[in-house]
Amino acid sequence: MATSNSFSAPSPPIFTGENYHAWAVKMKAYLRVDETIFTRIMACKTAKQVWDKLKIEFQGSEKTKQMQIFNLRKEFELLKRKETENVKEYIDRVMKLLIG
């Protein structure tokens, strides 16, 4: 028997003009954006503006991404197991490098 794994995100809380404080708290929970990040995006008018601003800030420019890739490759190529670490510790270190 097939099961459905579809996911439907809950609708954002709608502001009716009453109880602003409760609505604002619900919106923060819905958005799940840290306060320090929220202050950076609160002037954006659309979701696309928010997305683009966060993408530029946290992903960086194309040049920045290329430099990050270069540095990760170099670090990976130089990666060797230390004499004092067991295989699990070494694999954990490799995974940490790969995941970021």
Image (spheres, rainbow, N blue to C red):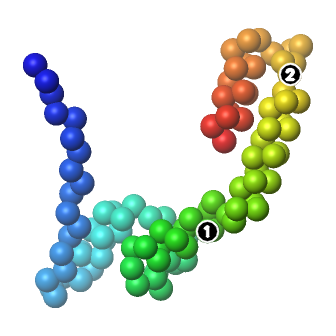
Residue 89 at x, y percent in the picture:
72, 19
Name the residue located 30 percent from the left edge and 76 percent from the top edge. Answer: 24
Q: Residue 56: which numbered mark, if any?
A: 1
Name the residue located 70 percent from the left edge and 20 percent from the top edge. Answer: 91
Residue 15 at x, y percent in the picture:
19, 80
Vertical placement of residue 9 versus 1, above or below: below
Distance (Cα) linking label 1 and label 2? 33 Å
Decide which of 10, 56 is in the foreground and name it. Answer: 56
Indicate the secondary structure of the residue bearing disc 2: loop
Circle 2 residue: 80
Name the residue located 21 percent from the left edge and 50 percent from the top edge. Answer: 8
What type is the residue that disc 2 sits on? Lys
Q: Across the whole image, how many numbered discs are drawn on residues?
A: 2
Name the residue located 75 percent from the left edge and 46 percent from the top edge. Answer: 69
Quadrant showing the N terminus: top left
Decide which of 18, 87 is in the foreground and name it. Answer: 87
- Please identify the residue farthest to the left as the structure is shown: 1
CB contact under 8 Å: marks 1 and 2: no
Quadrant showing the C terminus: top right
Vertical placement of residue 98 versus 57, above or below: above
Residues packed near mark 1 inside 10 Å, few (<14), some (14 to 19) or many (20 plus): few
Q: Which quarter of the picture shows residue 67?
A: bottom right
Task: Mark 1 vs mark 2: give the one in front.
Answer: 1
Indicate the secondary structure of the residue bearing disc 1: helix
Residue 93 at x, y percent in the picture:
73, 27
Vertical placement of residue 24 versus 58, above or below: below
Q: Disc 1 or 2, which lies upstream in sequence?
A: 1
Vertical placement of residue 29 versus 41, above or below: above
Q: Is residue 38 visible?
A: no
In the drawing, does residue 59 fall left or right of residue 94? Answer: left
Q: Is residue 33 visible?
A: yes
What type is the residue that disc 1 sits on? Ile
